[in-house]
Amino acid sequence: MAILVTGGAGYIGSHMVLRLMEIGHDVVVIDNLCNAPRESLERVSQLTGKEVTFIEGDIRDHSLLDYVFADFEISDVLHFAGLKSVGESVNKPLAYFENNVAGTITLCQAMMAAGVFRLVFSSSATVYGDATRMPLSESAPTGQPTNAYGHSKLMVEEVLRKLARSDPRWSIALLRYFNPVGAHPSGLIGEDPSGKPNNLLPFISQVAIGHLPALSVFGDDYPTPDGTGVRDYIHVMDLVEGHLAAMRVLADRPGVNVWNLGTGQGYSVLEMVRAFEMISQRDVAYRIVPRRDGDIAECWADASLAAHELGWKAQRGLTDMIADTWRWQSNNPEGYPSKRVVRRESLGKPGGMTNTLPKIYLIDTTRTNRVAS
């Protein structure tokens, strides 16, 4: 049996694929490469010494998914695919609903047709909206996200709740991430944004290495100790361990299960800048600019439910997060060697949807073989 990882060439997805393969799972990856290069999977193959089964395609493509579930014996689906920029989602909400919500519905339809009912969904703490009480537990109110990205995650959660309520065969985990950061300690895979980074730590690291002139700090008038936004940052390797823990318990937990994945510790933007400067021994120039639409003042997790029910707790602190980020950035100053450039206007349109069989690649460290077309 294999595990299907959607969005498996992306930042979190590639770290997940690596960890699954390290512990002996067979993995099938689907990714349309709109947010990630294939080189990430080549690095995964290099680290594991194993081939990576990769299908370039879109989860909104019914025929592609039907083919995948018919051709591979899938036991579980880890669903990372989707658009993820908070700022972009404010200006392009339909693209986010079409990719993130409609794509998940298409995936679930294909899963049902194939008799696969275990799903781990990559949700987000943005579903809590502009909450006033911290830390955030899973029982905190949802329904008021401040941006279309958060709305798309909340809409998917509602779809999955109703799906599980209608059919008891489903076992679904909704994992509400806080702010993933860091990189694999090898420095071979990490976060490689297309264009200007949307997330804080990659932006800081690109300023430190000289690719960007200064960090834009969006607002210094929030009701926080230094006036800048406070977030709960979690190392990507801790995050993938949370997925493994959720996947293990789903066999005995039908219905919908919700877990926060965070550290429970918040850091402000300026605290992150100072910590990065100390660890990297590089100066990070910054400038204060107006607040960004869709941002909130503070957000950090109560992850005690995951500790109790999954036996999971984040193990890596801020020093590891920053050191691993800087190692990745230093070793790969230009990111992955080649990046696929996709026009942002095309992101709302399903790509590669044809009646022909998909291209399946076996990626290893010495060759890339096309084995079906």
Image: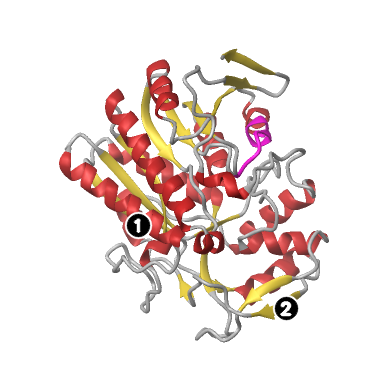
Which scheme is used to colour this image of the protein? secondary structure
Image location (x, y in percent) of residue 359: 56, 20
Q: 74 above or below 369?
A: below
Comparing 31 with 320, the one in front is: 31
Comparing 211 with 273, the one in front is: 211
Residue 167 covered by magenta stretch: no
Residue 36 covered by magenta stretch: yes
Q: Secondary structure at mark 2?
A: strand
Residue matched to label 2: 287
Image location (x, y in percent) of residue 163: 23, 42
Q: Secondary structure at mark 1?
A: helix
Sequence-wise, the earlier of marks 2 and 1 is 1
Determine whether, in the image, residue 250 is placed left or right of residue 191: left
Image location (x, y in percent) of residue 8: 53, 37
Q: For the residue marked with disc 1, what is the amino acid?
A: Leu
Give the Cα distance between marks 2 and 1.
33 Å
Q: Which residues are magenta?
A: 35-43
Q: Tell me the quarter of the picture where residue 306 sits.
A: bottom left
Q: 259 above or below 214?
A: above
Q: Which mark is residue 162?
A: none
The N terminus sits in image quarter = top left
Residue matched to label 1: 154
Comparing 359 with 302, the one in front is: 359
The answer to whether any part of residue 1 appears in the image is no
Q: Residue at x 41, y 27 (%)?
A: 65
The C terminus sits in image quarter = top right
